[in-house]
Amino acid sequence: MRRVLLLRLGLLLGSLSLLGQGCVRTAPGPGPQLTVWGVFDDADTLQPLLGAFEKAQKRGRTKVEYRKISPPDQYEEILSTALREGRGPDVFLIHASWVPRWAGALLPAPSDLVPLNAVREEFVETVENDLVINGRVVALPLFVDSLALYYNRDIFNASGIARPPRTWNEVHDVVRRTVQFNPVERAQIDQHGIAAGAGRNVNRAPDILSALLLQKGETFYDSEGAVAFGAEERAQQALRFLTDFANPAKDVYTWQLTSDYSIDAFAEGEAAMMLNYSYHRPTVRAKNPRLNFAVAPFPQVGETDPKDRRTYASYWAFAVSRASPNPQAAWELARFLTAEAAARDYLKRSGSPPARRDLVAELQNDPDIGVFAEQSLYARTWRQSDNRVVDRVFTEALDDVVSGRDTVEGALRRAAEQIQAAAAALGRGSGQ
């Protein structure tokens, strides 16, 4: 009898033990593992933001690894190859101008996480124009840079110029007052009024031409989506205006095909002005720490109504790969990084101008990037089926006109034809 009681007691204890095991909480398994690729930012800039994202996750298990890809000029090729071979990142930086030809690799954001209305309210206007396809957001930016006017204060002071030019007519006046020709070799320019007018020896010359085209009201495409600026008078005016700076027959002649590279000429004190982005402020300072220079807004056509002001935008944005095994977590990361708190932290670390409207308001009076912050409100781009082709043909158009190899009309017509051919080759004949 005792043996039976002991057996029954053992069975009861065993059952209770099994029931108890059912109540024990097992440790959660590992959460999503995300990889982020960037091109310019060091880990010191982005890692604190990624760490904050990891801590903010409710599940607390998401891990993020950041990788800076070098060299920058091979980033796109390295990224494309990695995605094609199935070893690419979940989240990666993409230049805004790449979006049309990269659209097939980009996973649109979930509409409940990144609604279109939120993008319109939170970010400057060019973001919706550049990063939304068929009503879906395909990337989100940390910053928006834009072309502005760099000027040499010492040259301005020596020439009796009290303030930077606001209009292109005023730029012409400054050029006439600051250009200096060699007294012996009259064909040689010792001091340039502005480092602009040609293609290959001017940094981001295609963007400068694009800015002038936008200021002229160029739409680039006709109602059928075909490239249309090749024969338009306003486009011809823009190209002619820019190349006049390198035309010896004009009274604003100040630049040559043989001039030093524009950034070098400005940094060495050989140019009174240049047109460039905020990211070249450190470049200029590194080349010449003693250069006394400042930055002013990009010149406009006459006394332009504030709502009609234009300059050219250039920026990078976080996109999510269609091949990511963790698309929801990847987009949560992109959204987190571009929200107000993280974006503010990033701008402090990087010195970049803001993409968010709330941060524009905070930084408009900043002594370093205030000009660029305010410009982000009216900076624009135009949708290019292949930005590499646009860079090449705009550079060639500028140099062909300056060298006399082609006319303004012929150079623009050829540029438009090549851009349209590139669009057709990519299966995107429309700029919409």
Image: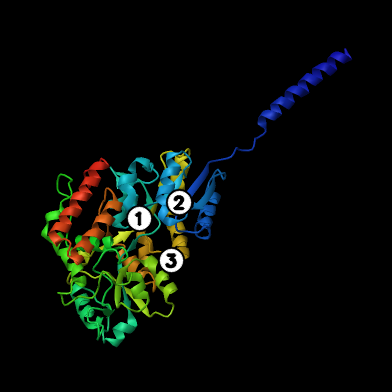
Within 10 Å of the Cα at label 1, are there few (<14), some (14-19), or many (20+) other Cα atoms?
Answer: some
Q: Which residue is mark 2?
A: 336
Residue 427 badge: none
Q: Which residue is mark 3?
A: 351
What residue do we see at 17% from left, 71% from top? 302
Q: Is residue 37 left or right of residue 361?
A: right
Residue 210 x/y as whole percent:
24, 60
Q: Nearer the viewer, residue 269 or 160?
A: 269
Q: CA distance from mark 2 to mark 3?
A: 19 Å
Label 1 vs label 3, nearer the camera: 3
Secondary structure type for disc 1: helix
User: Does residue 174 show up?
Assistant: yes
Image quarter of residue 71: bottom left
Looking at the image, do the residues carrying marks 2 and 1 touch, with CB atoms under 8 Å apart?
A: no
Secondary structure type for disc 3: loop
Looking at marks 1 and 3 on the same chain, the residue that comes earlier in the sequence is marked by 1
What residue do we see at 32% from left, 65% from top? 203
Q: Nearer the viewer, residue 7 or 273?
A: 273
Kindly identify the amino acid type of the residue bearing the numbered disc 1. Answer: Glu
Image quarter of residue 307: bottom left
Secondary structure type for disc 2: helix
Within 10 Å of the Cα at label 2, are there few (<14), some (14-19), or many (20+) other Cα atoms?
Answer: some
Residue 31 x/y as whole percent:
55, 40
Looking at marks 2 and 3 on the same chain, the residue that comes earlier in the sequence is marked by 2
Kindly identify the amino acid type of the residue bearing the numbered disc 2. Answer: Phe
Q: Is residue 184 left or right of residue 31?
A: left
Q: Quadrant of the N terminus?
A: top right
Residue 122 badge: 1
Looking at marks 2 and 1 on the same chain, the residue that comes earlier in the sequence is marked by 1
Image quarter of residue 338: bottom left
Q: CA distance from mark 2 to mark 1?
A: 13 Å
Residue 432 x/y as whole percent:
23, 46
